[in-house]
Amino acid sequence: MPRINSVEDLKKLKEQALDKIAVRLQGEDIDSLTQIYVGMDESGMQAGAKEVFHHIWSAVSGKPVVVLQTAKIGDFKEPAIKVVRPGQHAATVFEGVTIDKANEVISEFVEKGNPIEGMIAATHE
Amino acid sequence: MNYKMQILVCGGTGCLSSESEQIVKNLKHEIKKNNLTEDVRVILAGCFGFCEKGPIVKILPDNTFYTQVKPADAAEIIERHIIRGHKVERLLFVEPETQEVISDSKHMNFYKKQQRIALRNCGFIDPSDIEEYIARDGYAALAKAVTEMTRDEVVAEVKNSGLRGRGGGGFSTGLKWEFAKKSVSDEKYVICNADEGDPGAFMDRSILEGDPHSIVEAMAICGYAIGAAEGRVYIRAEYPLAITRLQKAIDDARAYGLLGKNIFGTDFNFDILLSFGAGAFVCGEETALIHSMEGERGEPTTKPPFPAESGYWGKPTNVNNVETLANIPVILLKGSQWFKTIGTEKSSGTKVFALAGKINNVGLIEVPMGTTLREVIYEIGGGIKDDRQFKAVQTGGPSGGCLTEKDLDTPIDFDNLITKGSMMGSGGMIVMDETDCMPAVAKFYLEFTQEESCGKCTPCRIGTRRLLELLEMITDGKAEMRHLDELRRLSRVICDTALCGLGQTAPNPVLSTLDAFWDEYVAHVKDHKCPAGRCEKLIRYNINDKCIGCTACARKCPVNCITGERKQKHEIDQEKCIKCGACYSACKFNAIDKM
């Protein structure tokens, strides 16, 4: 058990402890984060949505992005993901997402805002 | 470990009594069964406040808010929501007015107008984990106080915030601290008054159960500010969960060096012990509380001297209630100016209320001072149950009064409620509808205060007994008009002459209902009728011509006072009738009139 002897000790412990509540903080600030939805229904799971979800989750760790599971995103080739920018109703869907494609979506589209191949305009309720 | 999803389950007393611990066990079992232990964590959190819809389960990060969850729902939540991303529709909240299905609590009317300062961590952190509290800036205010601020600066910051005592009195917290600081003594004490006694109130209990470290931190800040090295929490023994969690918080704070010697490497020493109360309402009064802690009878003494000069063991003592203290760390971190932007000019900040009675959304709420009663009752509270007519709202518990329709647009703050004949009290708010009898309501509160009177002073010991007798005569239909005058006169005498706050405010429910519902009192006295149909001795049950002689009423009557041939109209023997209402409930043909 760490003993706190100074303000610096407290700050250090706070930084470590933030991991424990990170998911809850994301939920609290969800409207100010980019949201990536991964379709996890039966067909999505069979096409590898679970692996895509876990990969994206690790890849965006520490970034202002929240990864969420959802049921079927729409009539798209699975696995499908949907990206929603903070405060927007417009969304962008990517279908048939592989690990490589997921990396491209994160690094180019989400982080830099660059258009990439395979973007499908959609709406988010 | 970095979890991808977290499930918060309400661990408030209400939800616990509806098996929320079993829900946690079942969720953990399902998580293990589905090999999700590295991805999903379940936490028994503090109270979410929405007790009407408990047990509450919240999934994060998507903020899905499930209501009235049962242990048997755990498998479906894991299978459908956690694994496949489908929301379990049948567990989602439906807004009563619009029938809209809402999955995120921040869009619910119950939460929209709330602002959580004292309850900031309740329902968000694991109250048994000090590190979760630290992750939410816990103990940062204490660190700031002892390493960056002088004692005078801490007192000034609290004073400038305009924070007033949330336990009932509404006295300036900063001034109290200043008095205690200025008192010269080798020893001083900080006492947290956790003797929450109002019927139906559970504000302090929820804070202690859901965020105990906020109280530990605030007491240490107060200790630094006034120059005390010891703190005591006077907590009623009927709060076992609050005691367990608070004791764990104190033990953990000690182990982390946040209580004890040389806190944050400075020369400031502070520690906290618990003292248990036996549940006497009068021990919420600070001098009675101190006597109880000293092992004496829980009786108040005259002030001055105030505890700030001569309190626990005759030493300068600062007494604050739980909710008051819960605001302190936030005020120090965000500043008094920020705090003053919330609420009204003379009542800054927020107030926690236990919303109860004939209202759709029963629960614990925290709203900025200045919010109107109408907003609380109709927007947050969702209006009156069963679409009945609003009649009154009792604020301030047994010490408060009843406010009526004309007061609904009154902004809630300490001074407005007193002007209207009630008071803030510690935050009990009981809503009544057209079926509530106001003399009976006044009698209920008098029964409570009369029972809880410590007996030390005559006006309270005998006066409340006489008031109760008068109210019993009224609700029994045995009073005369002169008794109403006597009721008012005696109430005023008690207010003026009782020794402590309990006696001085005990007649408030009588006076406020006499003012607002005079006609109802007169109906009891002159007409021997209870307009709300609640006073048993003034009720008559009569069988009307709709009776088909089914005999259902006669079979249900416990005293066999209903007679009649089968398929013939029956009759009630009024001499024998005990007014239990069993016949009224049993009749399917509206053939029994309640008069």
Image: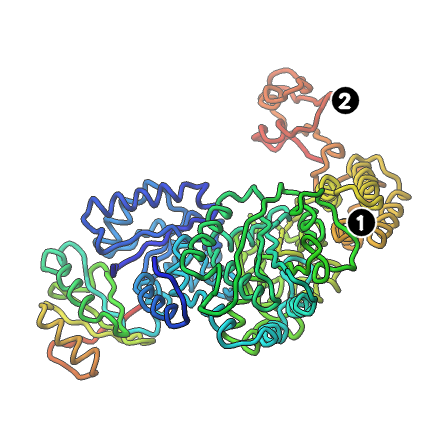
Q: Chain of mark 2?
A: B
Label 1 packing within 10 angstroms: few (<14), some (14-19), many (20+): few
Classify mark 2: helix, strand or loop.
Answer: loop
In the figure, is residue A78 to the left or right of A4? left
The answer to whether residue B291 is left or right of residue B63 is: right
Choose top left, top right, bottom left or bottom right for residue B264.
bottom left
Q: CA distance from mark 1 to mark 2?
A: 28 Å
Picture coordinates of residue B38, whole percent (x, y): 21, 54
* Image quadrant occupied by the N terminus of chain B: bottom left
Which one is nearer the viewer's eye here, A2 or B15? A2
What percent of the width, then of the height, locates residue B186? 65, 62
Q: Residue furthest top?
A: B565
Residue B172 picture location, percent across and down: 67, 68
Residue at mark 1: chain: B
Tag 1, which secondary structure? helix
Give residue B88's mark.
none
- Give the numbered dot on residue B519: 1
How far from the left and from the top, in percent, is residue B364?
53, 55
Q: Amino acid at mark 1?
A: Asp
Residue at 20% x, 66% y is: A57
Residue under the point 22% across and 56% down: B39
Q: Which is more N-terminal, label 2 or label 1? A: 1
Query: Which residue is at a point 36% across and 55% down the rendered structure image?
Result: B58
- Residue B575 is labelled as 2
